[in-house]
Amino acid sequence: MGFSKGQLLERLQAQQIKFSQYEHPVVMTVEAQAKYVGHIKGGLSKNLFLKDKKHRFYIVSALADTTVDLKVLSQRLGLGKGAVRMAPEEAVGEILEVPLGCVTPFALVNESAKHVSLLLDQALHIQDLEKFLKSVGRMVAYVDLEANPCVGKDQPPDLAALVPSVNTDVMEKTASLKIDSKPVSATAKASKVSKKEIMTNSFADPEKFIQEIVEKASAIVLSEMKDQNIKQQHGDGEQLVSSHLKKNLSLELKNLATMFKNTAYTEGFVAGTHCPAKKK
């Protein structure tokens, strides 16, 4: 479960972040929002929850009158034209753990949203917002969202550093979500790994592949060890930790093995096929 409204407010108070609270119904557009809070001093904002073709998610937070061209943004991120689009409605609850109409940078407090990248409008320099984001381990990146710089061989994408890494847990959760009414298959996506992508990961190098498995296993173990709630809420904490480790580690190994297999296929190797050595 994600943070409730009450828990979020308590966190802001604990960090001595000043805020004013206004209650209004859930709204889906800036125009609808303005009917309830348009009279309040300050600028209205809009928050776009986006997804690219590799199951990476982004929140773009901007002033209401800032123009955000998704095609231009895709190119600036180094993803090509049309690579980012609005995330499916199901992903709002699955990834951000907030209701529809409640997408804001504050949703990044939830653990499930740790791999979501945040792009802030350069006009949104709010000190207390920065304080909150830094408290949840977030890099604060301000962007001129209306800029349209040239992107080419000699001019690399200016926002490429803000593209999050592909996370296998997120891919597993969102494999069945739909974009433009077409189901997205994680297996199908994984099978289309390009040679260029292979060179940037460890799946073509067995030594690095094993190292990645060990690192992931270590991270899972440390995560379970730090979870003090297990001992507090359950009498048989050791058995529960063991169960969690088996489940999480099995999922990680399954994802890594699938990527390793797909990489081998892309390189020309096919399971079950014997290729005799070439005669000299």
Image (cartoon, helix red, strand yellow):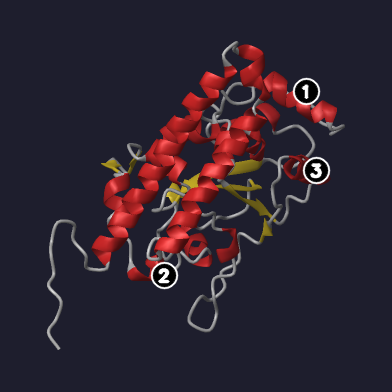
The residue wearing badge 2 is 199
Q: Secondary structure at mark 2?
A: loop
In the rendered image, the residue lying farthest to the bottom is 280
First of labels 1, 2 by sequence position: 1
Describe residue 166's horizontal placement relative to residue 31 as left or right: left
Q: Position of residue 172 (x, y in %)?
A: 39, 39
- Residue tagged 1: 10
Q: Residue at x 54, y 25 (%)?
A: 241
Any part of residue 163 in sight = yes
Image x and y of residue 87, in percent: 44, 42
In front: mark 2 or mark 3? 2
Give the crowd class for mark 2: few <14, some 14-19, many >=20 residues within 10 Å.
few
Who comes first in sequence, dot 3 or dot 1? 1
Mark found first going from the N terminus, 2 or 3: 3
The dot on residue 131 is: 3
* Residue drawn at 53 percent across, 66 percent down: 76
Residue 40 pos. (x, y %):
77, 32
The structure residue drawn at horizontal position 78% and vertical position 23%, both measured from the top left corner, is: 10
Near mark 1 (Cα within 10 A), the count class, few <14, some 14-19 or many ≥20, is few
Residue at point 56%, 28% (across, down): 98
Find residue 135 and report its horizontal and vertical position in percent. Answer: 76, 40
